[in-house]
């Protein structure tokens, strides 16, 4: 059974810092890996989708990498802003999707 | 991108009643949809896989007679919470799998409160 772990569980940084969120998974036989953002009481916002054949994806200040062999992905956020404060979820896709517990990010002005 | 809708977005009901939640893929067909449950400050837990034209596949520990899933068409899956109990209060999120790129698109969620 696929298990997804996210570290750290919570992170607080001052505005402007670059930061890295980590995701690890136990079964490397995946179709894709996806990073989501979730604001309190809201649904999911898809940030980046990496197919299993890809190594990374970039969108604006976000960059996600995937290393299937080691079962790891990172989400890099450059020049963080208070508006980036949210919970970030990593999900690994095969026939279904399995989610990590998330990293709760707070960016202080 | 593809859009998935859920209805209602929020529902409050009394214990013992049944509540139906709809999940629709608006601009693509989905033979497979998924239902997730999220408790406060917790992650999403897969409840079941909904397959068009056949029975849903439930995850271990999820009562199929309590959480009825019907995937009647390629664009609609419904989750019915039967004989609702306060413990069923949660955020329910559905997703639909777009087959060409094997990507899942998520609905906005339904917040269920059982009094």
Image (cartoon, coloured by chain):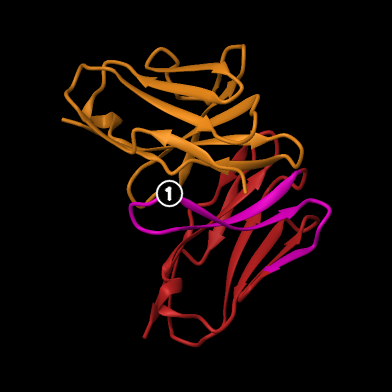
Q: Is residue A105 left or right of residue B97?
A: left
Residue B1 at x, y = what percent? 62, 49
For the magenta stretch, what is the residue range?
A: A30-58
Circle 1 residue: A43
Residue drawn at x 51%, y 23% is: B77
In the depicted structure, whether residue A100 falls above or below residue B12: below
In this structure image, what is the colour of chain A? red
Residue drawn at x 57%, y 12% is: B55
Report the front residue among A16 and B31: B31
- Crowding around mark 1 (Cα neighbors within 10 Å: few <14, some 14 to 19, many 20+) is some
Residue drawn at x 75%, y 65% is: A56
Chain identifier, orange in the render: B
Chain of the residue that carries numbered disc 1 in the rendered image: A
Residue A22 at x, y = what percent? 60, 65
Quadrant where the C terminus of chain A lies? bottom left
Report the front residue among A89 and B1: B1
Residue B3 at x, y = what percent? 55, 42
Q: Main secondary structure of the magenta part?
A: strand
Label 1's element?
Answer: loop
Residue closest to the far right? A53
Residue A20 at x, y = what percent? 59, 74
Quadrant where the N terminus of chain A lies? top right
């Amino acid at each position: 059974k696929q298990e997804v772990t996210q570290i750290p569980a919570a992170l607080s940084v001052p505005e402007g810092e670059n930061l890295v969120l980590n995701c690890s998974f136990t079964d490397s036989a995946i179709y894709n890996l996806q990073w989501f953002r979730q604001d309190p009481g809201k649904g999911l916002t898809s940030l980046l989708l990496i197919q299993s054949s890809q190594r990374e994806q970039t969108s604006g200040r976000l960059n996600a990498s995937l290393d299937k062999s080691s079962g790891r992905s990172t989400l890099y956020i450059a020049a963080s802003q208070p508006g980036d404060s949210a919970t970030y979820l990593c999900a690994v896709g095969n026939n279904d999707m399995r989610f990590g517990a998330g990293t709760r990010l707070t960016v202080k002005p | 991108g593809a859009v998935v809708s859920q209805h209602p977005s929020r529902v409050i009901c009394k214990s013992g009643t049944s509540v139906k939640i709809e999940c629709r893929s608006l601009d693509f067909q989905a033979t497979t949809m998924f239902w997730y449950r999220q408790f406060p400050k917790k992650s999403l837990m897969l409840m079941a896989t909904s397959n068009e034209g056949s029975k849903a596949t439930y995850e271990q520990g999820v009562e199929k007679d309590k959480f009825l899933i019907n995937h009647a068409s390629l664009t609609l899956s419904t989750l019915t919470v039967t004989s609702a109990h306060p413990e069923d209060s949660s955020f329910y999120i559905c997703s639909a799998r777009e087959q060409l790129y094997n990507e899942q698109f998520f609905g906005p969620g339904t917040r269920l409160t059982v009094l």
